[in-house]
Amino acid sequence: GFYELSAVPSFEELTGLISSNPDVVRWPAEKERRRAALELEKAKAVSDIKLGGGLQYFDEGDDSAFILGLSIPFPLFDRNQGNIKEAMYMLAKTEEQRKAFETDLRAALAKASTKLSSSFSEITILKNDVLPLAKSAFDSASQGYREGKFEYLVELDAQRTLFEVRARYIEALTGYHKARADVERLIGRDLDNVQNSPEAKAQESK
């Protein structure tokens, strides 16, 4: 529920889980796709050379001969080289792009993780310390006003403080759930399933 919190994993634990991100998972398949594209371009270059043959009959007599023909594109050494080089470049670039993506992902995860931790800490303080104090102050001011010990403005001020603290509490909860959703999107899984994951246990054993 909205008012429920779960323990926040450390950034180190979360970092070990980014391999579950769908955009990280796709890179091996992307590398194979680019490798296949390179092989296709190489195959196109070879297929440009055509070998053909057939019987040819001469006008005089019944003589015939088998004619062998070889069709070679010119220039010979420039067969599809542009596309091959482009495919080779894209394949070589795959690892570099994957590393750059994971670097950006870690940066985004660090930001979301920091927000999640700070929101969790703020909510804990507000819930356990600030809210009870504000509620107690308001109750005391209300009772004092009813007994004629305080003016109405004292009760009103205590009430305003309580409302402000409650509003801040709701705001902190909203920030917590947003940061949690961001973290879960970046690691590709629900945070409730993190503690028992093999990756998290591996991080704990280090």
Image (cartoon, helix red, strand yellow):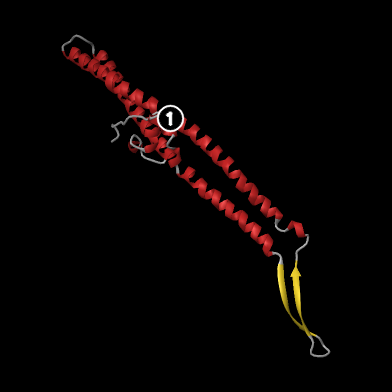
Q: For the residue labelled by badge 1, is the local secondary structure a helix, a strand or a loop?
A: helix
Q: Residue at x 55, y 52 (%)?
A: 33
Q: Is residue 173 visible?
A: yes
- Foreground of the two, 21 or 169: 21
Question: Label 1 sits on what residue type?
Answer: Glu
Looking at the picture, does residue 184 appear above or below residue 26? above
- Foreground of the two, 4 or 144: 4
Q: Residue furthest bottom?
A: 61
Q: Residue at x 32, y 20 (%)?
A: 125
Disc 1 crowd rating (10 Å Cα; few below 14, some 14-19, many 20+) is few
Looking at the picture, does residue 171 appear above or below residue 98? above
Q: Residue at x 72, y 58 (%)?
A: 79
x, y (%) of residue 109?
Answer: 46, 33
Q: Which residue is mark 1?
A: 12
Indicate left or right for 39 with 204 as reference. right
x, y (%) of residue 187?
Answer: 42, 38
Indicate left or right for 5 with 14 as reference. left
Q: Residue furthest top?
A: 149
Q: Residue furthest right?
A: 60
Looking at the picture, does residue 55 appear above or below residue 196? below
Q: Quadrant of residue 113?
A: top left
Q: Quadrant of residue 143?
A: top left
Indicate left or right for 175 with 50 as reference. left
Looking at the picture, does residue 22 appear above or below residue 165? below
Work out which quarter of the rendered image holds the N terminus and state it. Answer: top left
Q: Is residue 163 visible?
A: no
x, y (%) of residue 181?
Answer: 39, 37
Work out which quarter of the rendered image holds the C terminus and state it. Answer: top left
x, y (%) of residue 40?
Answer: 61, 58
